[in-house]
Image (spheres, rainbow, N blue to C red):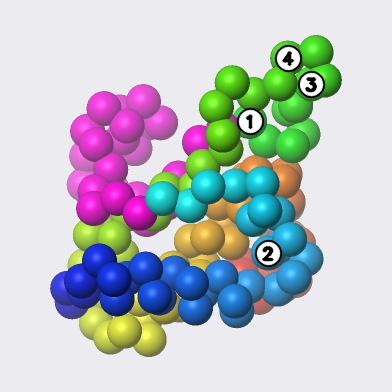
Amino acid sequence: MRLGEKEFDRIVKKAIRRIPIEIRQYLDNLVISVRQQPSKAMLKEIGIPPGEVLFGLFQGVSLLERSVISPPLFPDTILLFQGPIESACATVEEVEEQVEITLVHEIAHFVGMTEERLAELGYG
């Protein structure tokens, strides 16, 4: 499946609206950026072995690791990788679902949400 940039952006916006408010409220403090693919350097840096797929990545300092003394130097960002998401999906509906799941998991990294809580919310 291959979508245009505008169509994928529309799907991201739709996915954001479907995320429960308990999680969505943290998006005010995050930048969401869509990239075609993760770089090889990025994959190596986070320890993703060759052949593994990465749909998204949180870059920043989680709320649990923040300090008043040393605030983050850069904005916290969620990267969505359009190519891998499209490759894993056969329909637009599957892309929408995968984008939502990916966003939720990356927001969870930002706020320090447990896998158990994600499962309770239907994202486990």
Q: Is residue 32 visible?
A: yes
Q: Position of residue 95 (x, y in %)?
A: 35, 76
* Magenta region: 34-60
Dot label at residue 70: 4
Observer-side mark, 4 or 1, equals 4
Report the front residue among 121 and 80. 80
Q: Residue at x 67, y 36 (%)?
A: 62
Q: Residue at x 82, y 20 (%)?
A: 68
Residue type, mark 4 in image? Ser
* Location of mark 3 (residue): 67
Residue 104, quarter of picture: bottom right
Q: Indicate the secondary structure of the residue bearing disc 4.
A: loop
Residue type, mark 1 in image? Val
Local crowd at mark 2 within 10 Å, few (<14), some, or many (≥20)? some
Dot label at residue 24: 2
The answer for how far apart the CA atoms under marks 4 and 1 are is 11 Å
Q: Is residue 88 visible?
A: no
Q: Position of residue 106 (x, y in %)?
A: 55, 51
Local crowd at mark 3 within 10 Å, few (<14), some, or many (≥20)? few
